[in-house]
Structures are given as structure tokens and as C-alpha cells.
Image (spheres, rainbow, N blue to C red):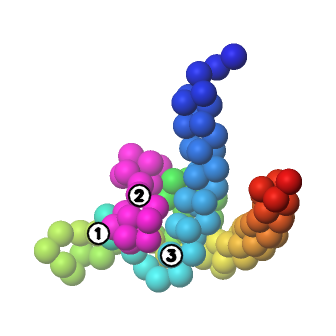
Amino acid sequence: MGNLKTIISQTKSEMRRGLVVLTTLALLKEPHYGYSLIQTLENKGIPIEGNTLYPLLRRLAKQGLLMSEWETDGSKPRKYYRITDNGETVLKALKDTYKTSTQSLNYILGVMENE
């Protein structure tokens, strides 16, 4: 049997992975560059490192869920990301799934706590 700390850590990572996709898509209704997205997520209680976020942004862009454009007017060039129409469709589906799952989990966990 595996180490309980390892099992808990791995399971939390799996749960968090989907939530990071959901929150990233939701936040990118407004354009963000990578570091500003890291700061926003952290301020909302979802800390994430660049070596996790940047590959995610590239993957979501490759899937057609995000678009990116370079802003070169400032002191240094920044790549801004924004959700696409396909990304909006995926976001809605993920939000619906999250809402249903949360309701079910709250019910199950509430029943279990009362037993």
C-alpha cells in the first residue's frame, strides 16, 4: 500500500488540474499576460507556478480555446491571452459540470458526515 501522504498529494494534484483549466478559461474573458494571470490566480487563492501555467496556456491555445497576441507598446513585449468562442463553449460545459459535481459532492459528503 502506498504512502498516504503521496496518495493525498497526487489526488489533490489531479483535482486541482481541472480546476486550474476552469479558472484560467474563466479569467481569460479579459486579456491577461502570463505573469498577471499568475498573480490574479494567486490572489484568488489558486497559487500556480509559471512552469505549470505557461505549458497550460500553450496547450489551450493549440486546442483553439485561447488566442494570443503580442503587445509591444510597453517597456517590454508581453503576450496577452484571451478566450475564443470555442473556449467559451468549453468553459460553459466545464462550469455546468463543476456546478453539478459540487452539488452532488456536497450532498454525498453532507450525508456521510451525518451518518
Residue drawn at (54%, 30%) of the image: 5
Residue drawn at (46%, 61%) of the image: 46
In the rendering, at what x and y percent does residue 35 appear? 31, 64
Find disc 3 in the rendering and name its residue: 28
Secondary structure type for disc 1:
strand
Foreground: disc 1 or disc 2: 2
Q: Residues within 10 Å of mark 2 (few under 14, many from 20)?
A: few
Foreground: disc 3 or disc 1: 3
- Whether 51 is among the magenta residues is yes
Residue 92 versus residue 42 in the image, above or below: below
Residue type highlighted by circle 2: Pro
Between residues 60 and 48, which one lies in front from this camera angle? 48
Task: Give whichever of discs 3 and 1 has the lower sequence position.
Answer: 3
Residue drawn at (59%, 51%) of the image: 17
Q: Which mark is residue 47?
A: 2
Distance in Å between CA atoms under marks 1 and 2: 21 Å
Quadrant location of the C terminus in the rendered image? bottom right
Q: Residues within 10 Å of mark 1 (few under 14, many from 20)?
A: some
Image quadrant in which you'd find residue 34: bottom left
In the rendering, at what x and y percent does residue 92 appear? 73, 76
Q: Is residue 2 left or right of residue 53?
A: right
Distance in Å between CA atoms under marks 3 and 1: 15 Å
Q: Is residue 35 left or right of residue 2?
A: left
Residue range of the region highlighted in magenta in the rendering: 37-55
Residue 11 versus residue 115 in the image, above or below: above
Q: Which mark is residue 78?
A: 1
Whether residue 55 can be seen here: yes
- Whether 52 is among the magenta residues is yes
Q: Residues within 10 Å of mark 3 (few under 14, many from 20)?
A: many
Q: Are marks 3 and 1 in contact (CB under 8 Å)?
A: no
